[in-house]
Image: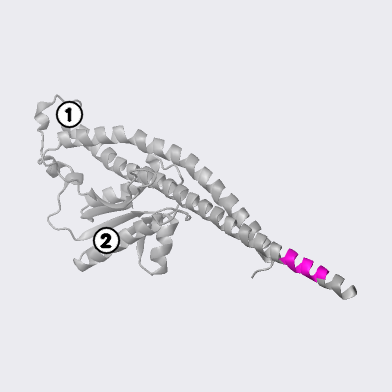
Amino acid sequence: MQSTKEVKRRIRSVENTRQITRTMEMVATSKLKRATDRVRAAEPYGDALGAIVRSLYLRKLAEAFPLLHQPEEIRRVAVLVVTANRGLCGGFNAGIIREARLLREDLLEKDLEPELHVVGKKGIAFFSFREIPLALQKVDLGDAPTVEDAEDIIRPFLDRFEARELDQLLLVSAEFRSALSTPPRVFEVLPVRPPKKVQPADHYILSPGLHVLVNRLLPAYLRNIVYRALVENAAAEQGARRTAMKSATDNAGDMLETLTRNYNRARQGQITQQISEIVGGAEGLA
């Protein structure tokens, strides 16, 4: 049995740990509220923009706009992986990395040429440790991604796709369904697939004109896809961290109860031993 001194030291250590995890849980809860608001705010604009692009789609536009080009064969594939810069969020990063790794292996089995572009320190550390080459490493994203961040990420891919140097762009990130449900997902960003039901743009009166609108809306549409992925990933990270820290706090509380019982038991044993020694000494003097 451990001595009371050792048990008391462990109790202090667990109490300090619980204080840290409780604080991190509170911080994650605060950040989750703001991150969720950003996700909700981005949805109406993104949905409306997507509906406009789909309604304006014409197959003949693919000849005029390189971003609407449909490659005859997919060979050069870019995989954009979005992870977090920090850990202590359960299996959040592990799930995204596992999805990206399986996707890469699947593309290699199909004899394609995947290249990895990773956002976030955790993903970069994983692939770098395994000596998997990375075409992009970006770690300067904060807890509140901006449209400018999305523009910086997507612009090189758009330029390469327009120059026919890239056939497909796949995005791997977390889907924010709720604070408790943040599964990883794979989303095709490029090429822009035509809608199943094409509504002719001739039914609209357009100003300043179809070609001008498409030229402006397409980059904004693709940028918004990346932006929504970034804000959803940030919200999912905070949700996963809050859940992980709450679980750690609860576990620390359970451990404190067990240690306190052990301490009381050890202390009772010491008191009993001291009383026995006193009684034995008194009897020896009698």
Rendering quarter of residue 51? top left
The amino acid at mark 2 is Leu
What residue is shown at x 36% (from left), y 38% (from top)?
39
> Mark 2 or mark 1, which is nearer to you?
2
What is the C-alpha distance between the residues marked 2 and 1?
Answer: 40 Å
What residue is shown at x 66% (from left), y 59% (from top)?
264
Q: Return the residue nearer the eye: 105 or 58.
A: 105
What residue is shown at x 26% (from left), y 61% (from top)?
103
What residue is shown at x 31% (from left), y 53% (from top)?
172
Q: Secondary structure at mark 2?
A: helix
Q: Callout 2: few (<14), some (14-19), or many (20+) C-alpha neighbours within 10 Å? A: some
Quadrant where the C terminus sits is bottom right
Q: Secondary structure at mark 1?
A: loop
Q: Return the residue nearer the eye: 7 or 151.
A: 7
Q: Callout 1: few (<14), some (14-19), or many (20+) C-alpha neighbours within 10 Å? A: few
Q: Which residues are magenta?
A: 270-279
The amino acid at mark 1 is Gly
Rendering quarter of residue 195? top left
Pinpoint residue 53: horizontal percent, then vertical percent.
20, 36
Q: Is residue 104 left or right of residue 30?
A: left
Magenta: predominant secondary structure element? helix
Residue 140: tell me if it is visible.
no
Q: Measured along the vertical axis of the image, is residue 67 above or below residue 118?
A: above
Q: Which residue is mark 2?
A: 103
Q: Is residue 271 left or right of residue 102?
A: right
Q: Return the residue nearer the eye: 211 or 128.
A: 128
Pinpoint residue 130: horizontal percent, then vertical percent.
39, 69
Q: Which residue is mark 1?
A: 209
Q: Earlier in the sequence, mark 2 or mark 1?
A: 2
Residue 26 belongs to magenta span:
no
